[in-house]
Image (tube, helix red, strand yellow):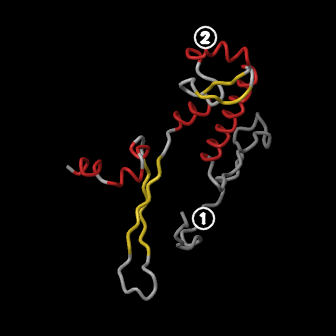
Amino acid sequence: MLLRSFFRSSLLLLAGPSVLAGPLVCTTSVEAPPPGSGSAPVEVTVCHPTETTTELINRRFYTWTSPMARGVDPLHQLTDVLGIAVGGIEGNRFMGFGFPDQTLIWDGSALQNTTGALLEEQSPPLPMRTLDISSGFNGSLAATEAIEAVPDAPMADHFPDVTPLW
């Protein structure tokens, strides 16, 4: 019932059909009313569409050229000879002027930029600090006991009780 009323509402016309096409990430916040209005705070929910990593890689990889199965039909063979780049996952979007060797370079650059951005998202902003590994050259192989530096354990009251920012 709720879904049927949603489809009949004008919200769907304003939002467009792309809102229903994929997963959404929604955030809700409470905003204060204007000063002097005397009304209660308002809860605001904002939703943004998300894209999986696989979808992102496929979209970026096939930006300038189409997949092999779609790229060998007569239309694509003609456009390749004329130097017209027709790309996209469906192989039906005019992308510009470029022969197949140039479009492969464009796809490679797009994929390199995408993987660089994905790796940047995975790495933490502050690197994890750890102790160094002992080198093995600080003793003799004939020695029966290895001399290793043991770090002192911090006392419980050494670190103050602080709530982290994350």
From the viewer's perspective, is residue 122 above or below residue 155?
above
Q: Nearer the viewer, residue 6 or 40?
A: 6
Residue 65: x %, y % from top left: 64, 24
Q: The disc labelled 1 sits on which kind of residue? A: Pro
Describe the element under mark 2 as helix, strand or loop: helix
Describe the element under mark 1 as helix, strand or loop: loop
**Residue shown at the point (53%, 37%) measured from the top left:** 53
Determine whether, in the image, residue 110 is placed left or right of residue 25.
right
Q: Would you name the residue on which mark 1 appears?
A: 154
Q: Quadrant of residue 153?
A: bottom right
Residue 151: x %, y % from top left: 66, 57
Q: CA distance from mark 2 to mark 1?
A: 72 Å
Using a 10 Å C-alpha cutoff, classify the residue at mark 2 as few (fewer than 14 neighbours), some (14 to 19) or many (20 or more): few
**Residue shown at the point (72%, 19%) measured from the top left:** 100
Q: Quadrant of residue 29?
A: bottom left
**Label number found at residue 74:** 2
Camera-nearest label, 2 or 1: 2
From the viewer's perspective, is residue 116 above or below residue 165?
above
